[in-house]
Image: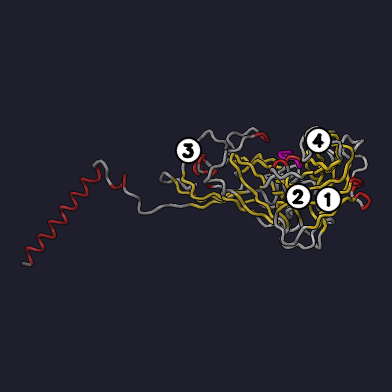
């Protein structure tokens, strides 16, 4: 019995050896189609794969923003709103009395503004409304309106409840608030400043956000029956903008992102072909070193986003349209005053470069919400001796022997 078993085992070993030798040369052998026993994963920080980067300003001006950010008086970047309203008609075309009724005198006005967001922990906020000349426009600067923000031009003060996160505020204005209303062809303009117990910010709505300020007019009219009655009409803002103290200009080796008018930066990549074309990118992280602390409203935060480009035409390059899957990707939150290194996951931007060779191997940095906040951050460019941008890539080569 022992001898027969020994011969049986020997026979099995010989049969397996022969079968293995035959299967190596047969189609569909394991070395070709079975997963390898070891997967090589590499991690590299590429410090010289970003070049020809540059920043451009002027994408979203203050008068085209979806919000008007005001900061408390005395802030390093103090800002104020500038509002000019559409001209009122000489007759009431709509109102509670009747169409075509003639106006015989101005009774009063009411200003309505919409608060979109505010510093949550700042108490005692007040919106101080000043009379401005109707000549203000989108080119008006902070220095232009400074002479009109003093006590003699205050026409209303709106208290902001400490519990109000967003909503409408209103103030009744006397007819004397605009002494040149008639000579200004029934037009009016106001400036709005923010006061509070401590440093903070508040954001007002605009036409672009469907939350414009509105000036309501209450007048005395001659009705059809010959009696004098009160009528009303309203006009939204023709111009809603804000002006602010500008931060220092960025240095020659810095990339500006954000601010007013908003700035964006373009980064162009020259990554090794062995990585971007012949590997599966597991993760790609953009590493940005701030060139100083982030600017903005006291206590505010903003998001820095990395957007892909469908083609690289410089400052007018079209962005890759976001999808439901990518809209939450490629961003990092930055606090005003922070100077920590910013890391942004750009895996979803880098991976398509291997599949679609026509895609521009570039990306654009911008802030969100763009134009509606004062937030601005400067990063070191590829020209900087210290703090140049880099990219960290974790990847798996698609072919044996490819490691970098």
Please report the bounds of the magenta region as a residue range: 56-62
Q: Nearer the viewer, mark 3 or mark 1?
A: 1
- When the figure is inspected, residue 335 is found, relative to residue 85, above or below; the finding is below
Find numbered disc 2 in the image and state the secondary structure of the residue it sits on. Answer: strand
Which comes before the other along the chain, label 3 or label 1? 1
Q: Which residue is mark 2?
A: 69
Q: Are marks 3 and 2 in contact (CB under 8 Å)?
A: no
| Residue bearing mark 1 | 172
Disc 4: which residue: 92
67 displayed left or right of 319:
right
Q: Disc 4 or disc 1, which is closer to the eye? A: 4
Q: Residues within 10 Å of mark 2 (few under 14, many from 20)?
A: many
Q: Which residue is mark 3?
A: 355
Within the magenta stretch, is there residue 295? no
Most foreground residue, 231 or 19 = 231
Badge 4 or badge 1: first in the primary sequence: 4
- Identify which residue, 306 or 158, lies in the foreground: 158
Instruction: Give whichever of discs 3 and 2 has the lower sequence position.
Output: 2
Report the side of 364 relative to 147 (left or right).
Answer: left
Q: Report how far apart the C-alphas of labels 3 and 1 lie in the structure.
A: 62 Å
Q: CA distance from mark 1 to mark 2?
A: 23 Å
The image position of residue 236, as x and y in percent, is 77, 40
Is residue 58 magenta-colored? yes
């Amino acid at each position: 019995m022992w001898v027969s078993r020994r011969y049986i085992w020997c026979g099995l070993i010989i049969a397996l050896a022969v079968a293995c030798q035959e299967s190596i040369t047969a189609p569909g052998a394991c070395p070709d189609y079975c997963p390898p026993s070891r997967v090589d994963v590499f991690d590299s920080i590429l410090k010289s794969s970003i070049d020809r980067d540059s920043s451009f300003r002027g994408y979203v001006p203050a008068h085209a923003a979806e919000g008007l950010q005001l900061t408390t008086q005395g802030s390093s970047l103090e800002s104020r709103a500038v509002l000019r309203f559409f001209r009122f008609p000489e007759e009431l075309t709509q109102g509670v009395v009747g169409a075509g009724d003639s106006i015989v005198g101005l009774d009063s006005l009411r200003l309505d503004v919409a608060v979109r967001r505010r510093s949550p922990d700042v108490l005692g906020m007040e919106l101080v409304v000043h009379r401005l000349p109707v000549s203000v426009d989108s080119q008006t600067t902070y220095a232009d309106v400074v002479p009109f923000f003093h006590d003699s031009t205050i026409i209303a003060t709106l208290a902001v409840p400490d519990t109000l996160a967003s909503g409408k505020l209103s103030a009744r204005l006397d007819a004397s608030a605009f002494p040149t209303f008639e000579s200004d062809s029934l037009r009016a303009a106001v400036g709005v400043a923010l006061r509070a117990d401590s440093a903070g910010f508040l954001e007002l709505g605009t036409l672009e956000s469907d939350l414009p300020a509105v000036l309501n007019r209450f007048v005395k009219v001659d009705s059809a029956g010959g009696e004098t009655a009160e009528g009303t009409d309203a006009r939204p803002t023709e111009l809603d903008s804000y002006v602010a103290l500008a931060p220092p200009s960025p240095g020659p080796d810095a990339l500006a992102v954000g601010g007013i008018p908003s700035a964006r930066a373009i980064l162009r990549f020259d990554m090794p072909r062995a990585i971007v074309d012949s590997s599966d990118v597991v993760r790609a992280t953009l590493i940005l070193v701030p060139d100083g602390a982030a600017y903005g409203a006291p206590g505010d935060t903003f998001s820095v986003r990395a957007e892909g480009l469908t083609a690289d035409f410089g400052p007018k390059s079209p962005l890759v349209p976001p999808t439901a899957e990518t809209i939450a990707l490629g961003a990092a939150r930055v606090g005003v005053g922070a100077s920590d290194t910013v890391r942004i996951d750009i895996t979803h931007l880098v991976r398509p470069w291997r599949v679609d060779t026509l895609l521009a191997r570039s990306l654009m940095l911008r802030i969100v919400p763009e134009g509606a906040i004062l937030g601005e951050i400067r990063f070191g460019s590829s020209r900087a001796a210290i703090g140049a941008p880099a990219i960290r890539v974790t990847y798996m080569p698609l072919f044996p022997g490819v490691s970098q």
